[in-house]
Image (tube, helix red, strand yellow):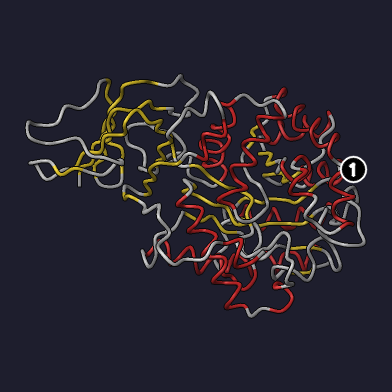
């Protein structure tokens, strides 16, 4: 089906400027044409209300975007779909995997309705990310594109052990086995826990955990299959060890000058999850030991992100907190608060994130020939980045997404918090 989207400003996220009074045409699931000017419907075709499609005599449809702002679909590239932060009812310790699976799907579908058309899952229990990816790809339910890491891998007793199905390994041979198991079960990327972190007791954020030979074993196996390796790494020494081991993305990350140089040398990505140390309202909901660690890292983390921006590091957008329909937008807001220009923040959540997930040729920008994953905002995010919350229309793979969750559906907060 041909769909005409008109009367909008396009923010293409290519690095070019926004374009006002535009018309975009989709043919099937791809962008067929982008033209200057507002579409004029044939006589007798009234303008729709509320961005509703209007049928045209040739069998196509037209949507008047009423001056909205058209962007590529946004990405969340550091998500744990089934995680709960905080978890006041201790569900993660008591619930069945089936309940966890249902919550993971709910988070993903809520994210799509919020304009997040792509998600990278960086550690899930029971391969539920693979199951939801297959369900969404087959059209069992309408959901975002998923790039999945399956089970995170940590050292015995290391960061994340005992949660989200994490695999505990020691030494390069056990690492190779774990990576191969994840690949066998459908992993698109591999996730390693290289340092301590905020959420696990009995460790600091600075401490290194995996050794160089273990990381090298993981990257060798993954790269032989054409897969990227993401690493949870806070402390600078762990970040640098990971990069020397050949990893492809640093998640979180305190960065000194040497770490910056290594990231640039490897052409790696940086996903700072900046809201994890800057969003005081969220931090104060955590257990006391986690609050202490997160607050102690606030200044150092902020300076690391600013240093990465100034050096031209590829920064992608991931929040590391559920529900992603909210926290993905918080991450964008906090990226801007620590000094990232609004346009760069949008590119981080679109072009750069799509590239990280292997979609550089098809997604992440509004250009002719690309897949039609699109979002329409009611106000200008280049004026105020919080406009990313003002979602009026979402299109995934050329199909309209119903933004209304449906009458009678409980809120995520009521269900889990």
Image quarter hosting the C terminus? bottom right
Rendering coords of residue 373 (x, y %): 39, 44
Q: Which residue is mark 1?
A: 296
Q: Residue 179, position in %: x, y?
A: 67, 64
In front here: 219 or 110?
A: 110
Seen in the image, is 117 located left or right of residue 220?
left
Q: Would you say 223 lies left or right of 395 here? A: right
Q: Position of residue 24 (x, y in %)?
A: 29, 32
At 84% from the left and 61% from the top, the residue drawn is 200
Q: Nearer the viewer, residue 318 or 402?
A: 402
Query: x and y percent of residue 177 in the render?
Result: 70, 69
Q: How many marks?
A: 1
Residue 320 left/right relative to 291: left
Q: Dot 1 surroundings within 10 Å: few (below 14), some, or many (20 or more)?
A: few
Which residue is rendered at x = 39% and y = 60% of the image?
A: 142
Q: Nearer the viewer, residue 193 or 50?
A: 50
Along the viewing direction, whichever of 183 and 388 lies nearer the viewer:
388
Q: Is residue 377 left or right of residue 389?
A: left
The image quarter containing residue 187 is bottom right
SS for callout 1: helix
Residue that appears at 88% across and 57% down? 288
């Amino acid at each position: 089906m041909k769909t005409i989207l008109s009367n909008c400003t396009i923010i293409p996220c290519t690095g070019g400027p926004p374009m006002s009074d535009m018309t975009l045409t989709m043919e099937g699931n791809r962008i067929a044409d982008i033209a200057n000017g507002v579409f004029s419907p044939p006589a007798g075709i009234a303008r729709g209300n509320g961005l509703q499609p209007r049928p045209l005599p040739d069998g196509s449809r037209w949507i008047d975007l009423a001056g909205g702002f058209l962007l590529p679909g946004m990405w969340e590239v550091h998500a744990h779909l089934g995680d709960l932060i905080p978890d006041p009812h201790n569900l993660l310790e008591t619930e069945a995997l089936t309940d966890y699976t249902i919550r993971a799907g709910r988070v993903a579908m809520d994210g799509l309705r919020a304009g997040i058309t792509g998600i990278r899952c960086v550690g899930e229990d029971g391969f539920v990310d693979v199951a939801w990816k297959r369900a969404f790809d087959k059209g069992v339910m309408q959901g975002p594109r998923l790039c999945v890491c399956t089970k995170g891998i940590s050292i015995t007793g290391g960061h994340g052990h005992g949660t989200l199905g994490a695999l505990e390994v020691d030494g390069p041979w056990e690492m190779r086995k774990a990576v191969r198991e994840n690949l066998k079960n459908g992993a698109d990327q591999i996730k390693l826990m290289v340092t301590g972190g905020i959420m696990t007791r009995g460790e600091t954020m600075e401490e290194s955990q995996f050794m160089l030979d273990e990381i090298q074993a993981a990257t060798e196996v993954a790269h032989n299959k054409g897969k990227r390796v993401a690493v949870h790494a806070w402390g600078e020494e762990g970040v640098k060890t990971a990069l020397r081991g050949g990893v492809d993305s640093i998640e979180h990350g305190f960065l000194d000058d040497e770490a910056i140089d290594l990231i640039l040398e490897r052409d790696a990505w940086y996903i700072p999850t900046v809201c994890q140390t800057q969003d005081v309202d969220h931090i104060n909901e955590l257990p006391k030991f986690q609050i202490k660690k997160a607050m102690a890292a606030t200044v150092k983390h902020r300076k690391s992100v600013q240093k990465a921006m100034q050096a031209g590091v590829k920064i992608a957008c991931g929040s590391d907190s559920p529900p992603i329909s909210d926290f993905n937008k918080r991450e964008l807001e906090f990226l801007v608060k620590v000094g990232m220009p609004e346009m760069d923040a949008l590119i981080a959540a679109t072009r750069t994130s799509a590239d990280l997930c292997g979609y550089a040729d098809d997604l992440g920008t509004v250009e002719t020939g690309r897949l039609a994953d699109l979002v329409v905002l009611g106000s200008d995010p280049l004026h105020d980045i919080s406009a990313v919350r003002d979602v009026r229309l979402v299109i995934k793979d050329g199909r309209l997404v119903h933004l209304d969750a449906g009458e009678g559906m409980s809120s995520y907060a009521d269900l889990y918090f």
